[in-house]
Amino acid sequence: MDIDVQVKICGITNSEDARAAVDAGADAIGLIFYKGSKRCIDEQRAADIVAHVPPYTSINALFVNPTEAEVRKVLSTVAVSQIQFHGEESSAFCEQFDRPYVKSIPVVDTARMKALIADYTNARAYLFDTHVSGEHGGTGKTFDWTKMPEKNIGHRILAGGLDTENVAKAIRIARPDAVDVSSGVESQPGIKNHKTLERFIAAAKLAGKDLAL
């Protein structure tokens, strides 16, 4: 049986890139509301982007250690499907917004990852990303894909340094439910290369079809 690996294109900053991602087959787009990111946008620009996206595309809002007010301000303006938390937010904080949420898990030792997963049992999915001290994703660096936790923990998203050249191999090794890419499909920070987008999504989808459950 084929594996349907979903693809999220993160760090979208304009409607043209959003449409290109969807047209190429992306299942989800990510909008970043963390001021420490080069791809950060405000809620007004995010709302304009979402207005150009088909209704069945998942819209993910990414935050890093936000205040409750910051999250609610975005939710009041942008049609967010689910929230992605990349900081040290507590599970209680993540669960208060009446949206499904994804919790980012830095890939470190197995015991530490299991402990973090146990703290966020109500997360819709877990995003596994490269651990870089002082960073919260978007580093463009890969990790050892054999360290990806097994499937019995729920939906697993693979991130960290993925690009058109390595995504198929990463999927074969880690066998994720979804992959998440930002810098690996860009011509410069925040600007997507549409041809690269197409190649990445095609490679990810093909790699999923080539895997047997």
Image (cartoon, helix red, strand yellow):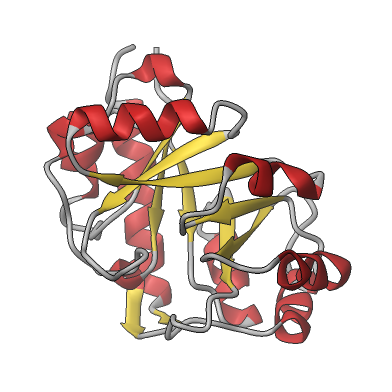
- Total numbered labels placed on residues in the image: 0
| Quarter of the picture holding the C terminus | top left
13 lies above or below 124: below
Residue at x 57%, y 53% (from the top left corner): 84
Q: Residue 136: x percent and y percent?
A: 37, 65
Residue at x 60%, y 71% (from the top left corner): 18
184 lies above or below 148: below
Quarter-of-image position of residue 37: bottom left
Q: Residue 135: x percent and y percent?
A: 30, 69
Q: Residue 67: x percent and y percent?
A: 67, 68
Residue at x 67%, y 41% (from the top left corner): 92
Quarter-of-image position of residue 142: bottom left
80 lies above or below 35: above
Instruction: Between residue 38 and residue 66, name the one nearer to us.
Output: 66
- Left-right relation of 20 to 178: right
Q: Residue furthest right?
A: 76
